[in-house]
Amino acid sequence: MTEPLKLAVVGHTNVGKTSLLRTLTRDVGFGEVSHRPSTTRHVEGARLSVDGEPLLELYDTPGLEDAIALLDYLERLERPGERLDGPARLERFLQGSEARQRFEQEAKVLRQLLASNAGLYVIDAREPVLAKYRDELEVLAGCGKPLLPVLNFVASPQHREPEWREALARLGLHALVRFDSVAPPEDGERRLYESLALLLEDAGPALRRLIDDQQAQRLARRHSGKRLIAELLLDCAACRRGVVAEPAAEAQAIAALRHDVRQREQRCVEALLKLYAFRREDANAGDLPLLDGRWGDDLFNPETLKLLGVRLGGGVAAGAAAGAGVDLLVGGLTLGAAALAGAIAGGALQTARNYGSRLMGKLKGQRELTVDDTVLRLLALRQQQLMVALEGRGHAAQDSIRLKAPDEKAWREGKLPEALSKARAHPQWSTLNPGAKVNQAERQEQLDALVEEL
């Protein structure tokens, strides 16, 4: 196994070095991110592996604080007649007392860069180009290691990217990477590693493996996220609650159903946050756009009626027709006592077992509450929008996620997926109902179909 590529992440204090590493490692707990200067006081490392093989080691370093004075000090280190190159001059500096006292922080940075294959020089693109940054680059260049400038926070409207590009070009640094550790572009990591591969030819194969693996992980996360949303929608579509047709009981049952659906959505939110390696406090279902939906009685969903006929063939159809005329056959929404009696007389014993209690409950003045289509649409919109926000969120972001009102027309106005209509007739598919049977093959088939439509 070859040695992993070592990268030192360097730059001025408080330019987002730790933030960049949090995003590259997908670790919100890496280091300490703060608006205070000099938050990082020591070198901290992270390793990226593929199939158990370490490919890249990233080292977070303290911020350079006094490069102007350090450069002046380095220029005085040469003895008369000497012409030391950059690394030799820095080695002399690191062996002296000033590296342990006045320039202790800078010495930590230089030691790590000398021990690395290359450095990422992180720049806060919102800052003006000042002389201290040019001096920092000159000091770092003395290490003799390739440097790749990373323009951080370019998503900010206050960025000064053109000025930085010009200043870096004047210093001979024409290759750079645009990034934003709070809102990284989708291809940001890929472009960073591709740029490194141009600087470090021998590291090209390892960096390509890293790029391919991260793309595979991105697609796998997206598919897993869609499946989490599909599980939520199927659970809610198949959920039903019986209640006596009495105002107080109905109000209590409706409140309980709303509470359970909201809790189910919160579990989906938390599962998505975990999938994308964010903290639970980064988003809450209560923070997402909410348009309260309607909750209604959907006992005689056409899919339920269709299922009655499919399961028992002509027997139930003939028996039901004896009491209900053509209403049942065409999927109508009327079904009376005669129809129930006719269905049982026609040999529909399985129907009586599966649906008899529900039908008799209807005749005795009971209601069944289900989640309205409006609520299903909103759940789908909210969770899909949350997933999009997580895909575009850097792991250095500190603010809670706030979503704009969704405007996706397919889920707002289009026909709901067939899988949700089928779920209406299968209360056993919902984990919100007692005795749920989530491993049924037909449920898995509809779940897969729903994932494809999200």
Image (tube, rainbow, N blue to C red):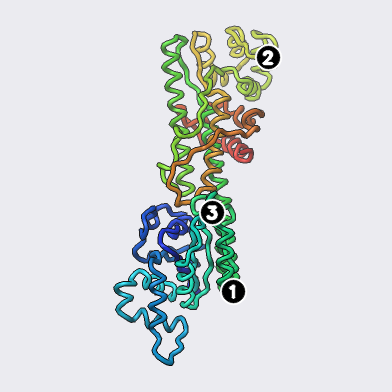
Q: In whole angstroms, how far apart are the C-alphas of marks 3 and 1?
A: 31 Å
Local secondary structure at mark 2: helix
Q: Are the residues at dot 3 and dot 1 in contact (C-beta closer than 8 Å)? A: no
Instruction: List the residue tagged with mark 1.
Output: 201
Relative to 374, say whether 385 is above or below.
Answer: below
Where residue 78 sits in the image (x, y, percent)? 40, 86
Q: Amino acid at mark 2?
A: Ala
Where residue 279 sits in the image (x, y, percent)? 41, 46
Local secondary structure at mark 1: helix
Q: Residue at position x 59%, y 74% from top?
A: 201
Comparing 165 with 228, the one in front is 165
Q: In whole angstroms, how far apart are the C-alphas of marks 1 and 2?
A: 77 Å
Q: Is residue 325 something that shows in the picture?
A: yes
Horizontally, is 64 left or right of 227 in the view? left
Q: In whole angstroms, how far apart are the C-alphas of marks 2 and 3?
A: 74 Å
| Mark in front: 2 vs 3 | 3
Q: Earlier in the sequence, mark 3 or mark 1?
A: 3
Q: Residue at position x 37%, y 73% from top?
A: 107
Q: Amino acid at mark 3?
A: His
Determine crowd level at label 2: few under 14, some 14-19, many 20+ residues with C-alpha closer than 10 A.
Answer: some
Q: Residue at position x 30%, y 79% from top?
A: 97
Instruction: List the residue tagged with mark 2.
Output: 318
Image mark for residue 159: 3
Local secondary structure at mark 3: loop
Q: Earlier in the sequence, mark 1 or mark 2?
A: 1
